[in-house]
Image: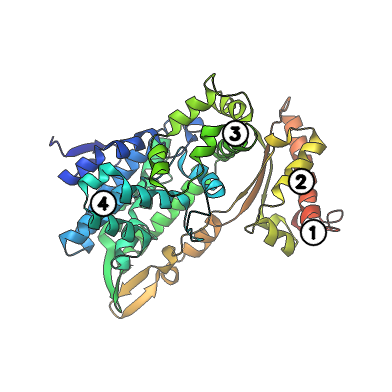
Amino acid sequence: MSGLELRDPVHGFIYREPLEQRIIDTCVFQRLRRLRQLAMESLVYPGAVHTRFDHSVGALHIARGLCAKLLPNEDSRRLVRLAALLHDIGHGPFSHVSEPLLQRYSDKTKLKVKSQDEVHELISWGIILHNKELARLLSEEDREQVVGLLKGEYGFSLYKDIVSGPVDVDKQDYLLRDSHFCGVKYGRYDQGRLTDTLLRHEDADDVILALSPHGVHSLEQFVLARYYMHTQVYRHKIRLITDGMIRRGILLGIEQDKIKWLQDLYSFDGTPEFLDQYLTWHDERLFSEILRPETRDGYAKMMFRQLQDRKLLKMIFQAQERDFGDPEVRRTLFGDSIDFFDQLEERIATVYGFDKNLVIADRLSFKSATRTESDIVVLHPGGRRLFRDESALFSSVNQSIQEQYFHVYAPVSYKDDREKRKRQTEFFTDIIKMITELLSPGKGSSTTAGGAK
């Protein structure tokens, strides 16, 4: 086997160019080996211990095939492959799970953050531009072009579509990889056939990603894989509870326990000094630092010890958007504001005798990217149509993926299944009423689930 080949359980042999291999060998890239792709999903699926490292190399592999097919010159191919390889370089401990905390505690006075930007993307761009290891391997122009590509500000739209678009290499790899390591078949689709049917299309003064009519069923299979992985894996209740406990444990460590190093870790200010410290952190270190004897006792240590021992909070309330009959309540509950969450958690804690800090209200909104598969152009000999008009199943599947949920987790236990069913019915009725009273005063006494009187 060549020194530039790697045997991957998902894609088989993965080939890397010498420059790509040198980037992979850097400390900044090797850190990704210590960031799990799915946080604590292994508490549900024991095999789900794969990492951002595996995924990034897999994304590179898929990008190589797409670039060879869709991009005519080697320089653009090289930049797109580099962007695919480095697209996750800025993830921190527990990756997307802790993203809201980076958003919450970042120093807004020093940052110019657009509403659509996620902080881990800003961190990724900063690392690519300023990290000394990467600067020794990539010219300043290369680094600026890679960041421009990731932002959608360099080259044709096709470049960004390959790395971060409706059917990008990120999704193409993680669906297959997550399915493989979770031991499920939900995320499987014909990746080779999908690549074969993706096309380069000149559109006015731009070049975009398009689809052959022969690829409609392949793309439908991809959409179904995404749907099943969301419903069966990414939204599994234990995964959602552990995500909530991680976020709450870190938040309480910052605000209640006043752990200085934890406060510093999530106070992103865009400086090279922050990035240097940030790159020393990963899942394992955060866990061990919180649980070490020298860290003061408090909520963070208690929460992470419970996660370590799989002593989890329970889901006491689960409702979908349609369970709330009042449009005003729905708009507020599933809007951007979280101001009433504290009030709801305090009311639930008071009624049931829980510690308020251990009651977690969580809104689950699985937002789409700006462009979804629906917008992909399908090229026919006589013209063009959008995928949503070609596919008989896309709209219903995409609508289901976008369904929003509201959950509440709390430290409750049941002596048997009968008590569990009884109390869960009580929780649902009572919490629906609490939410309605908080968001639509005067209606809570008469409004029940679904808006019935």
Quarter placement of the C terminus: bottom right
Sequence order check: which comes first, mark 4 or mark 1? Answer: 4
* Mark pair 2, 1: CA separation: 14 Å
Left or right: residue 82 versus residue 89 is left
* Mark pair 1, 3: CA separation: 33 Å
| Residue that label 4 marks | 82
| Residue 431 tag number | 2
Looking at the picture, which amino acid does disc 3 mark? Gly
| Residue that label 3 marks | 253
The one of 303 and 194 positioned closer to us in this rendering = 303
Q: Secondary structure at mark 2?
A: helix
Q: Which residue sits at x=25%, y=40%? A: 24
Q: Which residue sits at x=47%, y=57%? A: 117
* Closer mark to the observer between disc 4 and disc 1: 4
252 up-or-down from 308: above or below: below
Residue 328 spot, x, y in % from top left? 73, 63
For the residues bearing labels 1 and 3, Cβ distance under 8 angstroms:
no
Sequence order check: which comes first, mark 4 or mark 3? Answer: 4
| Residue that label 1 marks | 440
Looking at the picture, which amino acid does disc 4 mark? Leu
